[in-house]
Amino acid sequence: EVQLVQSGAEVKKPGESLKISCKGSGYSFINYWIAWVRRMPGKGLEWMGIIYVGDSGTRYGPSFQGQVTISVDKSISTAYLHWSSLKASDSAMYYCARWGGGNYYFDYWGQGTQVTVSS
Amino acid sequence: QTVVTQEPSFSVSPGGTVTLTCGLSSGSVSISYYPSWYQQTPGQAPRTLIFSTNTRSSGVPDRFSGSILGNKAALTITGAQADDESDYYCMLYMGSGISVFGGGTKLTVL
């Protein structure tokens, strides 16, 4: 069974760093892309960026380029989303999702990680 | 920057049929954008409904269907049920590994 299991909720202060994770299981992790999707309170889904596990190649949406870093550790089948300096506006629910190969869609989703940034 | 457009809200009567659309601020949506559709209810992760314009994801009932209508992608729900009340998002593949979500449609069943 394919599963993406995300790390737990985080409460941080502005300016702090944070890395949240997404662990894949039940499939060949190295052969797929993993994306991150944001949902801010009262807003819609936003495509943040994506990484190909095989070669760690990344793509970022224009609004997220330079704001976050997506990485992966193939040895433990885990993808990461990292902020070096959080802002209050980063408070949101974050989902990881598996890119379903040549059909250009997300076929599996993580359960979500709530990030709250508040002083 | 191209914006993916969706109706902000829609309502449908139980048992009725509703078609939600997904367009572009500039240009037409075609199968080359590989439209996909996702359903999200409060407190839940998104659920994949449709991919590659009209292919239902595993376990999705056949009352959900996808198509291209004119210059937009469309999601049609036939025989709407109370638990179809959700937010619906389309996503378009823009090329170069990048996709974009529409703003979402809040569907009310009443």
Image: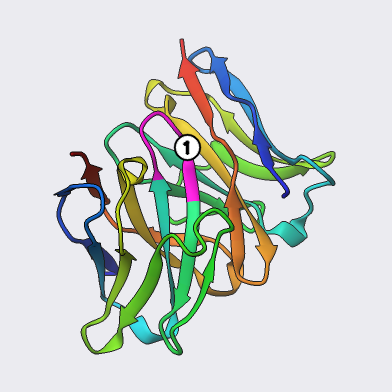
Chief SS of the magenta region: loop
How far across and down, in percent of the image, does residue B72 sit?
Answer: 76, 41
How far across and down, in percent of the image, does residue A22 sit?
Answer: 26, 67
Q: Please report the residue visible at 44 percent of the width from the left and 61 percent of the height from the top.
A: A107
B100 vs B69, nearest the viewer: B100
Q: Please report the residue visible at 83 percent of the width from the left and 41 percent of the height from the top.
A: B71
Count of number-bearing discs: 1
Does A65 sit above or below residue A74? above
Does B106 sit above or below residue A89? above
Asked if the magenta segment contains residue B69, the reply would be no
How far across and down, in percent of the image, does residue A36 sit?
Answer: 40, 60
Does A8 sit above or below residue B23? below
Query: Residue A38: in sight, yes or no?
Result: yes
How far across and down, in percent of the image, does residue A60 sit?
Answer: 53, 65
Question: In the figure, residue A98 lies in which quadrant?
Answer: bottom left
Q: Identify the element where label 1 is drawn.
A: loop
Does A75 sit above or below residue A90? below
B53 vs A20, nearest the viewer: A20
Query: Residue A28: in sight, yes or no?
Result: no
Question: In the figure, residue B64 lies in which quadrant?
Answer: top right
Q: Please report the residue visible at 22 percent of the width from the left and 63 percent of the height from the top.
A: A5
- Residue type at mark 1 is Gly
Viewed as shown, does residue B80 lie left or right of B26? left
The residue carrying mark 1 is A44
Viewed as shown, does residue A84 lie left or right of A33? left
Read off the magenta span.
A39-46
